[in-house]
Amino acid sequence: MAQEESSGESRSTYKISCLYWEGKPTEALYYREGEHFRRLGFKQAQRSKGFAISGMSKFELYRKATQPEVGKPPYELLSQCKIPNATEILFVVIPYERKGALLYHVHAMDDSMDTFPIGSFRFVNYTTGSIQIKCGKKTQQIGPLGLWSMTGTATKNGGFIPFVLGDLNGEIIYGTRIFGQPSGRELVFIIPPVKEGGTPRVKFISQLILP
């Protein structure tokens, strides 16, 4: 079993989808499934079409290698993360720059209806510090890369709900109203400010669930 984990291989099959952080990537990105490298198909500001991946314990993100090595697949490993034990999984692909090079980070989350049901919100903290979230009448504190799924807020016809971010001292640092709908799920990403000491940014991803 230890050998399977270190090589990124497993006997399980997972249903997954991917979400690119902003728009679509400017280059072709691939994932590995055993000996095969398959191109990822992203959609604009929403989850990709779901697909299955088998025989892997890690999700590995690649691009075509600019200088392929002899005897090795012509791909460059960009990022990898452990595949959660869940019926459905969402991988968020986040681009960033380092020394002028475009790189990527992959964050995995359980995307099943059991943990993220219809009519709920899911808040994900991508900042480097803990944040206090107040949505409607409910309050929760989440740390870096923490998430909180909140249910029972969407009215029968949907509507706007007060949404406030605060620091650990209780000071309000961001506030707005977000729309909840009983037939959908709302992903809310909390992002670091553009400049240090600034206000965190918030990104909303809506998903309508058809009957």
Image (cartoon, helix red, strand yellow):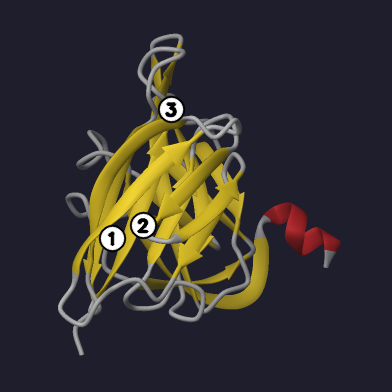
SS at circle 1 = loop
Label 1 amino acid?
Arg
* Residue found at x 34% / y 44%: 29
Residue that carries the numbered disc 3 in the rendered image: 192
Report whether residue 63 is seen: no
Residue 176 percent coordinates (x, y): 26, 43
SS at circle 2 = strand
* Residue found at x 51% / y 48%: 107
Q: Which comes sooner in the sequence, label 3 or label 2?
A: 2
Q: Give the distance between the C-alpha atoms of the residues marked 1 and 3, in whole angstroms.
A: 22 Å
**Mark 2 touches mark 1? (CB < 8 Å):** yes
Q: Which comes sooner in the sequence, label 2 or label 1?
A: 2
SS at circle 3 = loop
Q: Counting other residues with Cα less than 10 Å from the Cα at mark 3, is it few (<14), some (14-19), or many (20 or more)?
A: some
Residue that carries the numbered disc 1 in the rendered image: 47
Q: Give the distance between the C-alpha atoms of the residues marked 3 and 2, in whole angstroms.
A: 22 Å
* Numbered mark located on residue 18 in the image: 2
Q: Which comes sooner in the sequence, label 1 or label 3?
A: 1
Front residue of 155/95: it is 155
**Where does the N terminus fall, quadrant-wise?**
bottom right
Q: Counting other residues with Cα less than 10 Å from the Cα at mark 1, is it few (<14), some (14-19), or many (20 or more)?
A: many
Front residue of 108/124: it is 124
